[in-house]
Image (cartoon, helix red, strand yellow):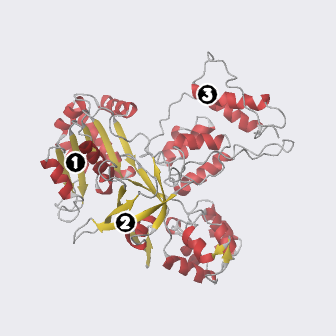
Amino acid sequence: MNHITPPESLIPENAPFSPEQRAWLNGFFAGFAAPDDALVTPLSPQANAAVLESATNDDGEAPWHDQTLAIDDRMKLAESRPLRRRMMAAMAQQDCGQCGYDCESYADALAARKESRLNLCAPGGKDTARMLKALAAELDEPPATSKPRVKEPAATPSSPGRSRDNPAPVLFLSRRRLNKEGSAKETWHVEFDLSESGLDYKAGDSFGVFAKNDLGLVDQIIAMLGASHLTPVRGKTLREVLRCDVSLSPAPDALFELVSFMTGGAQREKARLLAQGQDPDGDGATLDALAVLQKFPNARPHPEAFVEALEPLQPRLYSISSSPKTAQGRLSLTVDAVRYVVGKRKRLGVASTFLAERIAPGEKLKSYVQPAHGFSLPDDPTTPIIMVGPGTGVAPFRAFLQERAATAATGKNWLFFGHQRAACDFFYADEFEAMKAAGLLTRLSLAWSRDGEEKFYVQDRMRQAGRELWAWLAEGAHFYVCGDAQRMARDVERALVDIVAECGARSVEEAIAFVAALKKSGRYQQDVY
């Protein structure tokens, strides 16, 4: 079979298209120019129309690219846009890289049929996967008369540890509890040794961890299936597959579909509704693989069918809380161990409790470094920075401060940190106090939500210091936020708008536009989840 190299450009450079649009059109018309035996993936007329629409009817703006917006709001903003843009709006908008792309490039790959997996957006979960499934239906199958799709040559693999698809083994060193006695939380400082992995990273990057499911949960599922731990599945034992390869929470739509074929009457109807994203009993959000078997006791799938109905176990990303300049050959994370109760059953966060208790020092785990997308220190070391990171959101800012110290950056540094109680939840207190005493940390503003009669948060502390915060922004400071997207990040942005309006003598509309301009210029950066 002949391999062809398409022309460098089929669209004239002076044509009224952006570089991105020109690339789409080049790819589209290259299909017509290719000989019959070229490696071409045919698209249906509807798919081709979607590609043309994307290239000729898109202004390039993405107002839905906001991590704080709910999926319904994002889809409404994109409803009149081309298919690839609506696919982008379905993503969680975190540009976390956990899928191996950023949100826009993942959508582009799906629309161009260079990527077929619809369930890679871990932060978006089932809502994103369902929306992408519906949107992908607009790219129908190629006509029956089309030539069969030929697999393209495999791309050159990345170096080990540089992507989720090619992780590297990394040595787990240690963990230590950050909360003191009396805390309602369980947060851990976790360290890894990179010396044998060949990995490096930058302040602001994230670390992808391939965790393993809790064996107690795995064994309960095997018992409910009435199977043996040693039942062969995918060339491994059932126990090994359930522990290492598949996600046990949340329950995917495919599992409800499988159960619906094995039950009858009202139970079948409930399973069908759950598979369609409905919630007949109001418990859909709490159902994991074990809970499904408990909810539908008459359904006992064959182990192989059960495994095939589950999603792959995805890596988890954590903000790196160290700088490679001060922790050479090492990398640290700041991890909240997630534990909660549904009914009478204890539930565990897969990766967080794996790091907090299940992996032992000296063991290796599959990991990779995810480079930051628009979350990094200013190029100019004299630029002031304002960092807002309550709870584990402080992680990248610990790395930023270590980096600024190691590079002798002269820019001012202001950290807003908050948690529940000062006595037991002040992470890295000694380090930050030492940085403040040394003059590295110009300002340290703290907020404790459970120490007073009324709850007090970082956004409240921002408002108290509004005039000075505005003065820093007027000097050209960069503003950073890390932590919860749905509540904290929204509240912080509202507080900043209020500060700009009040202290900058602007209308609310002008203040909103000012903050939007900060984001567009890269002076307002977020690492939220």
Q: Which mark is residue 173?
A: 2
Q: Earlier in the sequence, mark 3 or mark 2?
A: 3
CA gap between label 1 and label 3 equals 44 Å
**Left or right of 34 on screen, residue 52:** left
Circle 1 Cα neighbour tier, 10 Å, few/some/many (<14 / 14–19 / ≥20): some
Residue, x 85% and y 45% (percent of image)? 144
CA gap between label 3 and label 2 equals 48 Å
125 in relation to 202, above or below: below
Note whether residue 186 is visible: no
Q: Earlier in the sequence, mark 1 or mark 2?
A: 2
Residue, x 55% and y 57% (percent of image)? 126
Residue type at mark 3: give it. Gln
CA gap between label 1 and label 2 equals 38 Å
Residue, x 24% and y 32% (percent of image)? 382
Q: Which mark is residue 21?
A: 3
Circle 3 Cα neighbour tier, 10 Å, few/some/many (<14 / 14–19 / ≥20): many
Q: Position of residue 424 (x, y in %)?
A: 21, 65
388 in relation to 451, above or below: above
Hey, which quadrant is residue 263 in on the image? Answer: bottom right
Q: Which residue is mark 1?
A: 460
399 in relation to 283, above or below: above
